[in-house]
Image (spheres, rainbow, N blue to C red):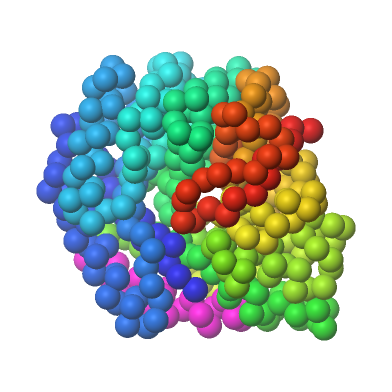
């Protein structure tokens, strides 16, 4: 198990307050040693601000990009690996114009993330909004090498503040921090094919509580230093190695290969266990199924067992929506809009947090292999639009 991210949230200002960012970096840096002492490495430190239209909404494109570049440099100087500026809400007329700035914002930075509100309980499913976000995805794909920039952008449905995972992260209120885990191996250790679903669910819950409680205790100890502890997102994010694959972990239950009948049931067991712990939680607390970040999912995708409709169906009982999905470079805005509308409709109907992080890859067709040179990605075949 690793800490994927210590995400520190605080309200930002324009002009940029370098001292406040330095304080956030210094605060998070204390965790590295504390977590190392209990054998839990920290992968990244991250910063999340309040939704940027709240404090940068009056800027023009070049001004916004300059602010983001200054913020990026300041974060780098203070040991912060990534920063999320939070979402634009295109349902609000005064914010909608800011969507057009996001492709340049992403293409002209390297560690800045952003997002857009696709839908929520208070926002009806909107084809106009979905199409506007689809256009952003297409433009980011064309503006960044291999379409890689869409790693740093997502459409959000029902996502609350203080999610520690990016791109969904944004902050609200007093300074706070939350923790994201890479813990698919913890789930795998509790999955066996010789038990009924109730026994498996209890075993997963107990394993999570045993392994994660020391992390929680450290977080509670540091919460006295001017940053409120928002919780731990128990979503068992996978890694690119076989022993950290959530796809392989679910297969240990004996219901078949991931993508075959039985996958939905396996996903439901794990997600129920996540919801039943006595830990302090925040964020999604669901099952993440990022195709490009999980070697097991990548392999099953290569074997033709994954479909976009199936991944979205699994989200109904578990996860975060459609995450790191490799798509053909010629996918149309109409097709992207339809995918986004499905995610929005599911999140709206179920009242749960979902997101859509879609990666059209210019020059690639369905069935061809991705060629990302990124240590946290597993290359796999480009998925077809159904």
Q: Position of residue 120 (x, y in %)?
A: 59, 35
- Residue at image coords 65%, 74%: 188
Please state which of residues 38 and 381 is positioned toward the viewer in this rendering: 381
The quarter holding residue 42 reads bottom left
Residue 216 in sight in this render: yes
Task: Reply above or below: 108 against 318.
Answer: above
Residue 277 in sight in this render: no
- Residue at image coords 57%, 54%: 378
Q: Position of residue 371 (x, y in %)?
A: 55, 44
- Residue at image coords 53%, 53%: 377
* Magenta stretch encompasses residue 150: no
Task: Reply above or below: 34 against 333.
Answer: below
Please state which of residues 135 and 327 is positioned toward the viewer in this rendering: 327
Q: In what quadrant of the picture does the C terminus appear?
A: top right
- Residue at image coords 54%, 63%: 239
Is residue 57 found left or right of 79 in the rendered image? Answer: right
Give the magenta-colored segment's residue range: 204-226
* Magenta stretch encompasses residue 215: yes
Q: Position of residue 266 (x, y in %)?
A: 77, 65
Is residue 293 found left or right of 84 in the rendered image? Answer: right
Q: Main secondary structure of the magenta part?
A: helix
Please state which of residues 62 and 144 is positioned toward the viewer in this rendering: 144
Q: Position of residue 152 (x, y in %)?
A: 45, 40
The quarter holding residue 230 reads bottom left
Is residue 270 found left or right of 198 in the rendered image? Answer: left
Is residue 192 found left or right of 160 in the rendered image? Answer: right
Outermost right residue = 261
């Amino acid at each position: 198990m690793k800490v994927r991210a210590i995400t520190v949230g605080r309200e930002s200002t324009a002009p940029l307050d370098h001292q406040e960012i330095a304080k956030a970096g210094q605060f998070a840096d204390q965790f590295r040693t504390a977590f190392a002492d209990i054998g839990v490495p920290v992968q990244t430190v991250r910063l999340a601000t309040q939704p940027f239209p709240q404090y940068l909404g009056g800027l023009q494109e070049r001004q916004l990009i300059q602010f983001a570049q200054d913020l990026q440099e300041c974060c780098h100087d203070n040991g912060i690996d990534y920063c999320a500026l939070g979402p634009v809400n295109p349902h609000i007329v005064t914010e909608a114009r800011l969507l057009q700035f996001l492709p340049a914002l992403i293409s002209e930075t390297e560690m800045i993330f952003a997002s857009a509100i696709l839908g929520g309980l208070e926002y009806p499913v909107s084809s106009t909004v979905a199409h506007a976000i689809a256009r952003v995805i297409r433009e980011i794909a064309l503006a960044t090498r291999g379409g890689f920039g869409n790693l740093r952008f997502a459409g959000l449905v029902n996502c609350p503040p203080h999610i520690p995972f990016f791109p969904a992260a944004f902050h609200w209120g007093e300074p706070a921090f939350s923790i994201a885990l890479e813990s698919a191996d913890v789930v795998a250790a509790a999955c066996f094919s010789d038990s009924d679903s109730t026994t498996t669910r209890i075993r997963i819950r107990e394993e999570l509580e045993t392994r994660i409680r020391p992390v929680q205790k450290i977080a509670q100890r540091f919460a006295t230093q001017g940053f409120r502890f928002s919780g731990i997102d128990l979503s068992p994010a996978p890694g690119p190695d076989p022993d950290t694959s959530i796809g392989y972990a679910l297969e240990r239950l004996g219901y078949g290969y991931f993508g075959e009948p039985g996958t939905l049931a396996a996903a439901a067991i794990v997600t129920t266990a996540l919801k039943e712990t006595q830990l302090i939680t925040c964020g999604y607390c669901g099952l993440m199924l990022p195709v490009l970040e999980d070697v097991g999912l990548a392999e099953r995708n290569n074997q033709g067992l994954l479909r976009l409709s199936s991944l979205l169906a699994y989200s109904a009982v578990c996860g975060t929506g459609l995450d790191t999905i490799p798509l053909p470079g010629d996918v149309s805005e109409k097709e992207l809009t339809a995918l986004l509308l499905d995610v929005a409709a599911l999140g709206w109907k179920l009242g749960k947090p979902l997101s859509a992080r879609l990666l059209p890859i210019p020059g690639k067709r369905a069935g061809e292999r991705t060629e990302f040179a990124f240590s946290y990605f597993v290359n796999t075949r480009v998925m077809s639009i159904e």
